Amino acid sequence: MDLAYSVEHEAYREQLRSFLKKNRNKSPGTGSGAMAANDWQQLLIENGYAALTVPKEYGGAGLAPDILKSHILAEEFTLAKVRPGHSGDNRIVPVLLELGTEEQKQRFIPPTVRGEMLWCQGYSEPGSGSDLASLQTRAHVDGDDFVINGQKIWTSGAKTAHMMFCLVRTEPDAPKHQGISYLLIPMGIPGMEVRPLKQMTGDSIFNEVFFTDCRVPTTEIVGSRGEGWYVANATLKHERGGLGDPNQAASRFHEVLELMKNETIDGRRLIDIPSYRDRAMALQARVFAMKFNGMRVLSHNIKNEEPGLPRWIVKLQGCELNHQIAGLAIDVMGELGILYDESPYIRDQGMWQHRYMMDLGLIIGGGTAQIQKNIIGERALGLPKEPKFDKPI
Amino acid sequence: MEFMLSEEQRMLQESVSGFLESHCPLDRVRSAADAEESMANDVHAGLCELGIPGIVIPEEFGGVGMGFLEAALVAEALGGAVAPVPFTATSTMVPVALLAAGSEAQKQNWLPKIASGEICVAVGVTEQLGRRESDGIKAKNGRLNGKAMFVLEGMEAHGYLIADSTGALHLVDADANGLSRTKLKTIDRTRSVAEISLDATPADVLPGSVSDREPLLSTIDAGRLMLAADTLGAAQAMLDQAIAYAKERRQFNRPIGSFQAVKHMCAEMAAELEPCRSLVWYAAHSVHAMPTEARLMACHAKAHLSEVGQFVARTATEVHGGMGFTDLLGLHYWFKRIGFNRQLLGAPELIREEAARVQGLVS
Ligand SMILES: Cc1cc2nc3c(=O)[nH]c(=O)nc-3n(C[C@H](O)[C@H](O)[C@H](O)COP(=O)(O)OP(=O)(O)OC[C@H]3O[C@@H](n4cnc5c(N)ncnc54)[C@H](O)[C@@H]3O)c2cc1C
């Protein structure tokens, strides 16, 4: 056990801090010198603070993978409350880097990393959510094209995205996991219709996407025909890693504490009410536990070892923790906690109610809590698998 | 001993639920919310025909003279239908206050109109439960000054029952001099909440509330009980929808309800909620039959239903998967109604503290 960072990493942290101090007013959303999001991203890449491991030839910073540096980076940006950079899209870029053709990498990665090309994930269908591998959207080959027919649902960001990475059935006679291909589809092509769906929060980030004889060149496939399920699992892994981030829970917890120190009831600070304080402290213990759990995952990752159980629980526990943090904020605000939609007296623009609902959405999205528990039971704990019924019951 | 509903009570339940089913389907709830109607007038009119606004008002004042158990059954049905109509404040809290502390003239003046549904009266007592921002209301020489926040059913009201900073209760006309109302937008678009500003506004104090806090407290008890019953109905509606969905939705070649994970979610919701029904019945029955227990029971009903309601709201949403998170099935109307009931008239921790105090457990 050694929690100290090496001299090299300490130096890195110092360097980063002075960069942030000097440039924080350029960060989008802070101060008048703020840059557009994409210019800010470019500045970060040039200084080696975004798209770290994406090779230079594809527009990244081209650094050797250093998990600890990425971790320091995330910590310092959160601490400084400065908008962090990104690696394009943590679902698609790693997939393209690992499995894309040279031509695909050159065409898609640079604009994605610059933030100019946005992606949406076309996986779920009305009949295929948890049972994703049963998906029915089909593509058959006609000349040099795939011709796509079917429907996706819950596609976040489809209205603003330029591209979709999408799972379609290309081998209808193969077993269900082996009949799927992973396609890259430009949004807005003929035959594609995007219909927004409203969510419980009142926003419409979700969409339905309909395909009627949509044509995409057969070269726009990642991996081979029938390998889509395995390609997709590479991205699902990245998505799961991202949901339930302990740093996010820590910073939200900090915000609740601030709220409890500043708001009063009958002139008494909320933090002075023992039952509220106790709930806050119970959540703080969870926040710490998840943060340190994250340190363990990190330590295994640095050594290139499979972290096992500590990794499998992150999505389940982290999303639940965020939901409970929002729930505490609402409760301590009493009647103020139900205000929404730019109401007079609203606190923090109603973000706690928004988060409370959104976090429930994230408990469901990206693999539901129940599916997470199945995975923990079967993969991490080695419990026998649930018998599968390939025939309808 | 017979702890069950009477034939008449079951008939009341059926007639209110039946009416709401046909006249207040989800589409009507949506249209009211989207048009920002402060209440669905057609639904309210139908309920007036059934005598609902006067349910606890004695016959001598034009009501139907039923008890709080009957009122709780109505609140449960309204929660079950997420009905965008006033009830808790105008039909239970205000009558309780008037009957406990009003002068004969005040009762004669207000109760018959409330009972017929001709007018609605909203309630502003939040500052007496926990002052968040405004300094509350000051009364002087028959006039009120200050702000009342979170006035329940406040936007559609013709009159207000407002507690001043001493706890005395005042009746105020909606069009009285110096009164202005501002809509407070909440997550729940089926009930209205307002901020009422009063500037030397003429008010009519309830004489019995001037040096006695009891009328204020029993008014709050009534409101808490109704919010608890409303949550009971809303949570039951969410559970029913989750069960129906679990039977019908298929994944992995089988109905999702055949997965123990889903079955257990449904069973846990049912196991948590069913005893709540008994708690609400007992609490409501105690108002007339065992008044010494009524306050404690109202506290527990409100706090406990808030907890169970929250659990059911999130779990029923989870059973629906991504569908639960969207507007498609409208599940969020119930989710938000339950969330609203939780925060109004005291969130759980504060009410449990009160439950302890009521029993003399706090030194
Ligand atoms: C906020 C959010 C964002 C999303 N973004 C996207 C996106 O961008 N792209 C995309 O493709 N999809 C997206 N989704 C869809 C998401 O991946 C699915 O909602 C999720 O996988 C669940 O599928 P479903 O909605 O069909 O629910 P279902 O699979 O129908 O599940 C219903 C219930 O059954 C349970 N259940 C199902 N199978 C089992 C089992 N084997 N064992 C135990 N319980 C089971 C579930 O846990 C759930 O409680 C998003 C969803 C949300 C909520």
Image (cartoon, rainbow, N blue to C red):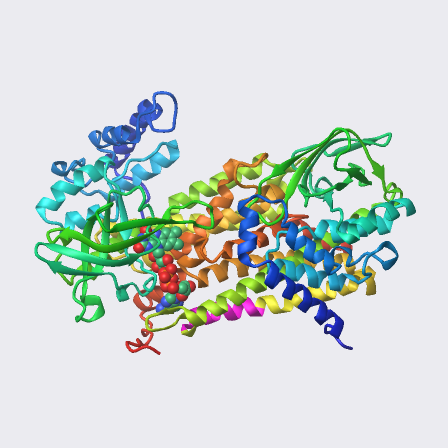
Q: Report the image quarter containing ligand 1.
A: bottom left
* First to last magenta residue range: B259-271
Q: Position of residue B169 (x, y in %)?
A: 81, 41
Asked if the stretch drawn in magenta spans residue A237, the answer is no
Question: In the rendered image, which quarter is residue B121 located in?
Answer: top right
Q: Is residue B348 above or below residue A5?
A: below
Q: Residue at x 49, y 51 (%)?
A: A324
> Is residue B268 in the magenta section?
yes
Q: Position of residue A145 (x, y in %)?
A: 12, 54
Residue drawn at x 47%, y 47% as measured from the top left: A201
**In this rendering, would A212 be left or right of B289?**
left
**Residue A152, quarter of picture:** bottom left
Image position, residue B87 (x, y; %): 70, 53
**How far across and down, in percent of the image, does residue A264 sit?**
63, 37
In-image side of A106 versus B191 (left or right): left
Indicate the quadrant containing the N terminus of chain B: top left, top right, bottom left or bottom right.
Answer: bottom right
In the image, residue A109 sits, relative to residue A29, either above or below, namely below
